[in-house]
Each structure stands twice: as structure tokens, then as C-alpha cells.
Image (spheres, rainbow, N blue to C red):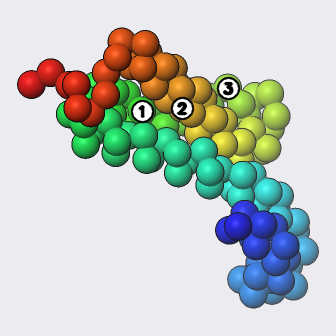
Amino acid sequence: MASVGLLTFAEPVTKLFVGTRTDLLELSMRANGFATIIYIPAGINILMSGYYTAIDKPIESATIATLRSFVFIVCGLMFLPTIWGLDGVWATIPVSELLTLIVCLVIVLRNKNKGHTASQRKK
């Protein structure tokens, strides 16, 4: 819902901050398109990291947190701008969140196949 609101009202809200500068408005609108697509994957990634912390699985939690906040961002900033220019900079966070979401799914499936749940964890 936040994404829809930001996409729908992006221009009037952005104009409040950039005024009549059309170059800055265009750049801000382009960046807004990249920023609004990350809410759901980012929320899931944060939730999964917190979940694994809560069930005493610090390796899984730290892996998710480190990948989304450092590893994939650094890699993205090193490679994506060389492919897509400035859009590569804006795409770094969404790509990082999507890659982390894939890792989360792998971790969930791996733990599910091992039969690990919160009530079955080893003490």
C-alpha cells in the first residue's frame, strides 16, 4: 500500500522538496521507482532475520542480515553501475533485497527439510 501511495503521489510530494528544478525532479522520480519496489522483500528479509534470532539460530539470522546490509550492496555497487550506469546505483538495494529473499527461501527450505522448528531446536 505504501508503494502504491508513493508511486501515485510521487510527483507532488517530490515537488515539495525540489521545487521547480526539473532536473532534480526527474532524477528523484527515477529513484522513487526503484525505492518503492523494495518494501515487501525488505520486510520479509527483516522478519526472517528476526525469526531466526528468536528461535536461537544466530548463523541463519546473521547470514540474512549481513547479506542484505553489506555483501550484496557492496557487490551491487561494484558491478551494477558498470552495466546500467546511474540506474545501477538505484537498482543496488532492490537487487540486494531480492537476492537476500532467495537466500531466505533456501534457508527456510533447508531447515524445513531437516525438520527444524522452534519447538524442536537443540539446546
Q: Nearer the viewer, residue 70 or 81?
A: 70
Q: Taking 97 as reference, is 28 left or right?
A: right
- Tag 1 near tag 2, CB within 8 Å: yes
**On residue 49, which mark appears?**
none
Tag 1: residue type?
Ile
Mark whose residue sits in front, 3 or 2: 2
Q: Taking 110 as reference, is 86 left or right?
A: right
37 versus 58 height, above or below:
below
Give the residue pinned by disc 3: 79
Tag 2: residue type?
Thr
Give the residue pinned by disc 2: 100
Give the spatial CA distance, label 1 vs label 2: 6 Å
Tag 3: residue type?
Phe
Give the residue pinned by disc 1: 64
- When asked about the image quadrant of residue 101, the answer is top right
Q: Earlier in the sequence, mark 3 or mark 2?
A: 3
- Assign a secondary structure to mark 2: helix
115 versus 71 height, above or below:
above
User: What residue is rendered at 73% in x and 34% in y?
Assistant: 81
Q: Which of marks 3 and 1 is nearer the N terminus?
A: 1
User: What residue is rendered at 80% in x and 38% in y?
Assistant: 85
119 versus 23 height, above or below:
above
Total numbered circles: 3
